[in-house]
């Protein structure tokens, strides 16, 4: 396994957008866009291919999200990471809160998952003043688990500007060898992801149930998850992961 590190700011650009929530009595925190920068060849190659990606907290060193990427020639920042940043930081300009069929119930579920007063107020304002824009699937829809994590880190997420918001997180890409074809890639990566999620249940994944899994979080270190992924990959492909790419500002 080859390890390579890059600055996260070289890959992802953050820009302010005037909030859609102009009628709110207090400023909306949903005002940041995350997009892919123009990459050099070595940067682009580092995050190409298929594999397992992780997002970890620089504060607790905990892996907070795990996902798979199966497009051999895809754009993982556009397809996954930019969207995740909108939803797990609670700062995304396009963030959706879901619950279009029953927004009142959805508001209750979200408020029960978060403690940060400013974020709670944002959810309440979204319900009162931006119901049709926010309480639906926007293509960037967040979840109670993701907002729970945002709430836990709201002291940094809630006040961070466009230059600071990425400093709290590290992105990892564990690249699996190139498969013979895209169908093989889809099967192999899905099998690996399912195995690891069953073991670790990171806090921002839907598999995480707070009442049952909160104590497991302290064991979700990057090294523990990486070794579990390597073991699963070897079982599925008979080979090790080829690269562990680390993107961080710290």
Image (tube, rainbow, N blue to C red):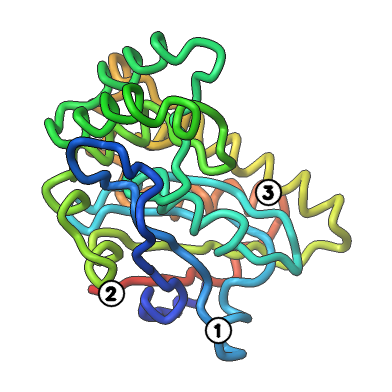
Check disc 1 and report its element: helix, strand or loop.
loop
Horizontal relation, residue 173 to residue 249: left or right? right
Tag 3 residue: 189
Residue at 19% of width from left, 36% of height from top?
25
- Indicate the position of residue 138 as horizontal and vertical percent values: 56, 38
210 vs 125, nearest the viewer = 125
Quarter residue 73 falls in: bottom right
Sort mark 1 into few (<14), some (14-19) or many (20+) by Cα contacts within 10 Å: few
Considering the image in quadrants, where does the C terminus appear? Answer: bottom left
Sort mark 2 into few (<14), some (14-19) or many (20+) by Cα contacts within 10 Å: some
Check disc 2 and report its element: helix, strand or loop.
loop
- CA separation, marks 3 and 2? 28 Å
Check disc 3 and report its element: helix, strand or loop.
helix
Horizontal relation, residue 151 to residue 19: left or right? left
- CA separation, marks 1 and 2? 18 Å
- Indicate the position of residue 76 as horizontal and vertical percent values: 60, 62
Q: Mark 1 or mark 2: name the one nearer the start of the chain.
A: 1
Sort mark 3 into few (<14), some (14-19) or many (20+) by Cα contacts within 10 Å: many
Tag 1 residue: 38
Q: Vertical placement of 241 versus 138: above or below? A: below
Instruction: Name the mark on residue 187.
Output: none
Residue at 26% of width from left, 20% of height from top?
111
66 vs 195, nearest the viewer = 66
Tag 2 residue: 249
């Amino acid at each position: 396994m080859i390890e390579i590190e890059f600055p996260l700011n070289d890959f992802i650009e953050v820009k302010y957008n005037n909030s859609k929530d102009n009628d709110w009595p207090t400023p909306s925190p949903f005002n940041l866009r995350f997009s892919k920068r123009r990459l050099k060849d070595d940067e682009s190659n580092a995050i190409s291919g298929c594999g397992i990606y992780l997002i970890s907290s620089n504060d607790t060193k905990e892996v907070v999200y795990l996902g798979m990427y199966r497009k051999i020639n895809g754009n993982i920042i556009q397809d996954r990471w930019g969207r995740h940043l909108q939803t797990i930081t609670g700062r995304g300009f396009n963030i959706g809160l879901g619950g279009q069929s029953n927004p009142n119930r959805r508001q209750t579920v979200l408020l029960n998952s978060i403690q940060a007063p400013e974020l709670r107020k944002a959810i309440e304002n979204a319900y009162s003043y931006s119901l049709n824009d926010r309480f639906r699937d926007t293509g960037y829809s967040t979840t109670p688990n993701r907002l729970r994590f945002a709430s836990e880190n709201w002291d940094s997420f809630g006040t961070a500007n466009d230059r600071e918001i990425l400093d709290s997180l590290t992105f990892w890409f564990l690249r699996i060898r190139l498969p013979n074809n895209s169908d093989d890639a889809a099967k192999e990566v899905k099998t690996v992801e399912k195995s690891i999620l069953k073991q670790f249940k990171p806090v921002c994944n839907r598999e995480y149930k707070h009442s049952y899994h909160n104590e497991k979080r302290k064991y979700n270190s990057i090294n523990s998850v990486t070794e579990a992924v390597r073991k699963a990959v070897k079982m599925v492909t008979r080979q090790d992961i080829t690269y562990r790419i680390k993107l961080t500002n710290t």
